[in-house]
Amino acid sequence: MARSGDRDVRGQTLEAAAGNGLINRRALLGRGMVIAGAMGAGIGPSAAAGAEPLSDGPWSLEVGDPTPLYQVPSKFEAKVVRTLSNPNHEARNSHSRTPHHFLEGTTTPNGLHFTINHGGIPTIDPDKHRLVIHGLVKQPLEFTLETLSRYPMTSRVSFVECGGNSAPMFAPEPMQETVQALHGLASCAEWTGVKLSTLLEETGVDPRAKWLIAEGADSPHLSRSVPMQKALDDAMIALYQNGERIMPGNGYPMRLLLPGYEGNMNVKFLRRLKLVEQPGMSYYEARTYSPILPSGKAYRFYFLQEVKSFITHPSHGMALKGPGLHEISGIAYSGTGRIEKVMVSADGGKSWAQAALQEPVLSKAFTRFRLPWRWDGGPATLQSRAWDESGNVQPTRAEFVAARGQLDKPAPVLAFPNQHYNSITSWGVASSGEVKHVYA
Ligand SMILES: Nc1nc2c(c(=O)[nH]1)N[C@H]1C(S)=C(S)[C@@H](COP(=O)(O)O)O[C@H]1N2
Ligand SMILES: [Mo]
């Protein structure tokens, strides 16, 4: 609980919102809390500031570096990188995971967007690339990057998440892995391109068309069937990612963006859309990416990425530097729409406080949540739980396992046969300050 002596700059008492030190999110609305005074000894801003003039570092005494044509992060940020499933570049399906624990806000920088490429990253000459829309259309059309760019463009922020994201949590024991290893197959960007409905207006749609088959130009020619309803709703042929051309690993020069739908359906290096009556039952929709149920049955299709959240700060592998005020912060999203609320617990789910959501809260996009917390130095179990605007709620782990099962024995992070895991993640904080992945 917040102690009565803890006050924000307006002199208001930091109001307890739930057990084990959670503070009301309204404390974040003020002009800031008095952190230096509220921190434990030896951490936080120095109380002696202002007494002596600042000393000059060597960087203050010489002319700095020349300006590069394309800038990259500071060399001091070298640890902020993706992790690779095949670090030695073995020729097979390759995953790279977003380091959520090093990032803030809601936009994933392009260099850190996760990627999954089943046949490597093709080097596509944008001038030679073509997109064809055919099948059950009135008039088949072929587009170059140039002709596509003449259509009205729109931008939208959307997350992309692999159906296999968070699958390590199917393990019967909590895997001692970072938020990057557990949840790094989800990222969020602003995508700009042409709405698919605009192009389908021009080709015309035969009323018999119920699906379209999207195909990529990479060597596996990855293809997925997409319901026409989604194609005519918010599907986009994306050409830009956070303002610049789509990264090679994310589908250069164009990809299908299906906001809120399973990552695999967002076909990259997009070269063909064929309108058909029946789904194609391609490799990735017939064999992979369908959740397996405890009964042994599998879903035929499972397109939606359901409501999920996880705390990124603090999270597994970090160490709190001492009791006192800390901010709990994380990411929430739902393939159905906007995030309605996120609740946070510091006592393993016994009591909950509502987190502040950073505006703007966008549909099918990452939403950052925050809550102040006074850690008393004792054990704590941190959890977050999200609700979306349609009333869908993130399941507890017990609820999820009851419905969807778990593995009998541990498996390596990469070898998870099941998909679409979205239950609550728990981080255990020990008295030493060490943070570990736990099940609660
Ligand atoms: N052509 C093609 N499209 C593809 C893939 C691929 O290997 N080839 N991988 C799919 C998978 S499994 C996922 S999860 C998403 C990942 O999108 P990203 O790499 O932009 O994050 O792309 C999908 N689209
Ligand atoms: Mo995926």
Image (spheres, rainbow, N blue to C red):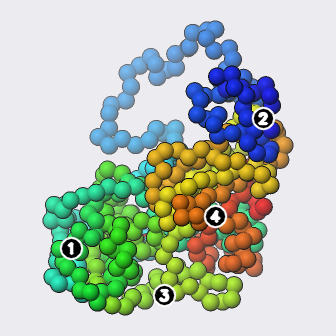
- Vertical placement of residue 9 versus 160, above or below: above
Question: Of marks 1 and 2, which one's residue comes earlier in the chain?
Answer: 2
Residue under numbered circle 4: 394
Q: Which amino acid type is shown beneath numbered disc 2?
A: Ala
Judging depth in this view, the residue of 54 and 41 nearest the camera is: 41
Residue under numbered circle 1: 201
Circle 2 SS class: loop
| Marks 4 and 2 in Cβ contact (< 8 Å) | no
Q: Which amino acid type is shown beneath numbered disc 1?
A: Glu
Judging depth in this view, the residue of 61 and 361 nearest the camera is: 361
Asked whether residue 267 appears in the rendered view, the answer is no
Judging depth in this view, the residue of 400 and 263 nearest the camera is: 400
Q: Residues within 10 Å of mark 4 (few under 14, many from 20)?
A: many
Q: Residues within 10 Å of mark 3 (few under 14, many from 20)?
A: some
Residue under numbered circle 2: 2
Circle 4 SS class: loop
| Marks 4 and 1 in Cβ contact (< 8 Å) | no
